Amino acid sequence: MKYTEGPEIRDTKAPEGPIEERWEKRKFGAKLVNPANKRKLNVIVVGTGLAGGSAAATLGELGYNVKSFCYQDSPRRAHSIAAQGGINAAKNYRGDGDSIYRLFYDTVKGGDFRARESNVYRLAQVSVNIIDQAVAQGVPFAREYGGLLDTRSFGGAQVSRTFYARGQTGQQLLLGAYQALERQVAAGTVEMHTRHEMLDLIISDGRARGVIVRDMVTGEIERHLADAVVLATGGYGNVFFLSTNAKGCNTTAIWRAHERGAYFANPCYTQIHPTCIPVSGEYQSKLTLMSESLRNDGRVWVPLLKNDERAPGDIPEAERDYYLERIYPSFGNLVPRDIASRAAKNVCDEGRGVGPGGLGVYLDFRDAINRLGRDAVEKKYGNLFEMYERITGENPYDVPMRIYPAVHYTMGGLWVDYDLQSTIPGLFVIGEANFSDHGANRLGASALMQGLADGYFVLPTTIGDYLANGPYGDVDEEAVAEAEIQVRNKIDRLLAVNGTRTPDSFHRELGKLMWDYCGMERTEESLRKALERIPELREEFWQNVKVSGTAEELNQVLEKAGRVADFFDLAELMCLDALVRTESCGGHFRAESQDADGEALRDDENFAHVSAWEHSPEGPVLHKEALEYEYVKMTQRSYK
C-alpha cells in the first residue's frame, strides 16, 4: 500500500505558558454564546456512552438544541456499561502521595511518551470534578469505614486513585449520565433517536453540518442537519473480530468522517488487555474481560516447568513462577497493560502456559482469601467471580482464574486539537473515538475518566467557541443529496452481490489475520503479509458476500456487512501505520525494536510524533504532529 508524506500538522488551540494554567487560559479565551442564542443552535451527538451521553446531557442543560443518536434500543446499552474496575481521579483521599501532577506524570509515562502533555494535564485536572459530579448524581461508589469514598490500585501507578462501584463502575456511571440525558429529553432540549445508525457525514461549505442515518427498524434513510456534529462512537477493537468489545462496536462513523476529510491518528495503537478469559473454541464470537482491579489482590503465576499439566493446587509454591513480581518488583502485578500482556505471551511461548493449548496464566486469590477472609474478597469482587464461574464452570474461590491477553481498547482515533475538534471544522470527536489523551498505551481506569471529562467538562466549553460564530446558515442541498446517494449506493451494492459467504465469516478471517500479523507483536514481514492479504480478502468480500433480506426492514445481516466492509479499509491503514512506525512503543510492539530484556524500545529521534493520516484517492497521506515535552523527560520506561 503506497503512501505519501504531507506537511506537518500542529495543534494551534493548545495555550502556552505554565501547564497548570493552560486549561483555565483556554476557557477564558474561548468565545461565549449567550443563553438566547444557544436556543438558535443545533448540535448532533452520535453515541450515548459515557462521552456521548454526558455531552448531550450537558449541551442540553446549557440550552442548545441537541439530537442524540445511538444504534442500541436504549442509551443504557452503550458499551460503556461493560467497564468494570473503576475510574481514576487525583483526589488523594488515601493521603498516599497522589496529586494532579502525579496522575499527569503516570499517564504520560504509561502511554510511553506518545501523548500530548497539555491534553493529559487537563485530563488530570478535570478528574477531580468528575467524581463530585458522579456522586451528586447518586453513583454508589464504594466507601471505606470512615465514610470517605474508597479507592483501589490499578496498573501503572503506585498510589491508590481508582474509585469504583464493585465490578460495575461503568454501569453505574452510565446510569448517572443516562439520567442526566433523560432529564434533558423530558425538558425538550434533547431529541433522542435510538436504533439509528450513522452511515455518512454531511459536509457543506467545508463544515460538518449533519449526518445520514438509517432507521434500523424500518430501513428508512434519514438526513439530519445541525450547526455542529459530535462523534462519540467508541473504538474500533472489533476489527480483530475476537475482542472484549460488544459485538455492535464498529468503526463506521469515524471511518466515514475520515473519508470526508478528518485525519485518522495513530491507528496502529491498539491495547491488549492482560486479564481476559482465554479463547475456548472456534465457535466463540467475542471475549469476556476480567477487570484489571483483580490484579490488586490476585497474583499472576505459571508453573516453573514446561508443559506442567498438574492441577494448580498440586503445584507447590517452590515450583511456581510469579513472573510479574519477579521481573518488575516495584510494581509487581500492577504493571501497565501492555507490559503485563507481553509478559504473559512470553511465558506461554516458552511452553509454561496453562489450560487448553497452553494459552493461559493463573490469576490466584488464595493468598488474598487467607489474608483478608472470603467475605472481604467477595465484597470487592463478588460479581466478577460469579461472572467467571458462569462462563467457565470454575469457582475462583477454590481454583485460580485462567486469563490471557485480548484486544480491548484503541488509543488511535480521529485526530483532534486541544478543543477536541477534528480537521473538519464543526466536527468534534470525544472519548475513545479520538486519539488525544493516552499515547501508545492507556492506563487502566482512564477510559471512563476521559469519556466523562470530554463530555461533562471539556467539549461544552470548547464547542461554544465554535458555535459563537453560528448559526451557519442553510446547508447545500447538493451536499446532502450526494451523501445520501452514497449511502444508498453502498447498501444496494452489498445486497446485489448475492454470494455464498456470510459477513461474519469474512469478519472472522480478517480478525484472525489481524491478530496473527498485527496483534501483540508486529514485524515487517508479518505486516507486509497482512497488507498483501487484506486487499485480496476485501476483493473476495465484494464478490462473494451473502446479504439476505432487503434494505426496507430490520436487517442485521446488512448492518454487519456494512461494518465489515469498513473494517477492511481500516485494517489496511492500521497495518500501514504499524509498518511505517519502525519503533516499539506501548501497545505497538515491533519485534525488531526491543532492548536486551525484551522491553519495547522507542526511537524518540524519529518517532516522537503523532501520525495523522489523510484520506486521498491516490493513497493515504501522512502528516506528522511533533510531540514536545517540557515537564516530563522522555526516558526508557521502567517498572522494575
Image: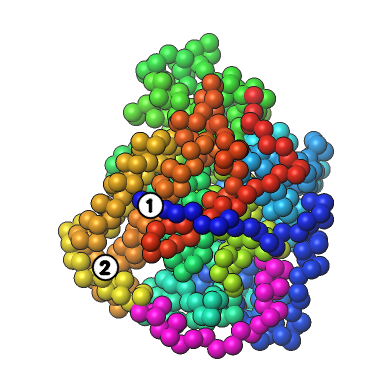
Residue 458: x and y in percent read 70, 63
Query: Which stretch did the figure color magenta?
Result: 458-485
Are discs 1 and 2 less than 8 Å apart at CB?
no
Neighbour class for label 1 at 10 Å: few (<14), some, many (≥20)? few
Going by the image, does 206 lie left or right of 30?
Answer: left
Element on which disc 2 rests: helix
What residue is shown at x 48% (from left), y 77% (from top)?
Answer: 202
Indicate which disc residue 2 carries.
1
Q: Which residue, given by chain and number where applicable, does mark 2 sit on?
A: 494
Q: Which residue occupies 61% across, 32% down?
A: 335
- Which image quarter holds the C terminus? top right
User: Three-letter amino acid code at disc 1?
Assistant: Lys
Q: How is the image coloured?
A: rainbow
In this rendering, the answer to whether 108 lies above or below 216 is: above
Q: Is residue 528 magenta?
A: no
Q: Does residue 245 appear in the picture of this structure?
A: no
Q: Residues within 10 Å of mark 2 (few under 14, many from 20)?
A: many
Q: Can you give x and y, in whole percent of width and height, for residue 455 in the image?
A: 65, 64
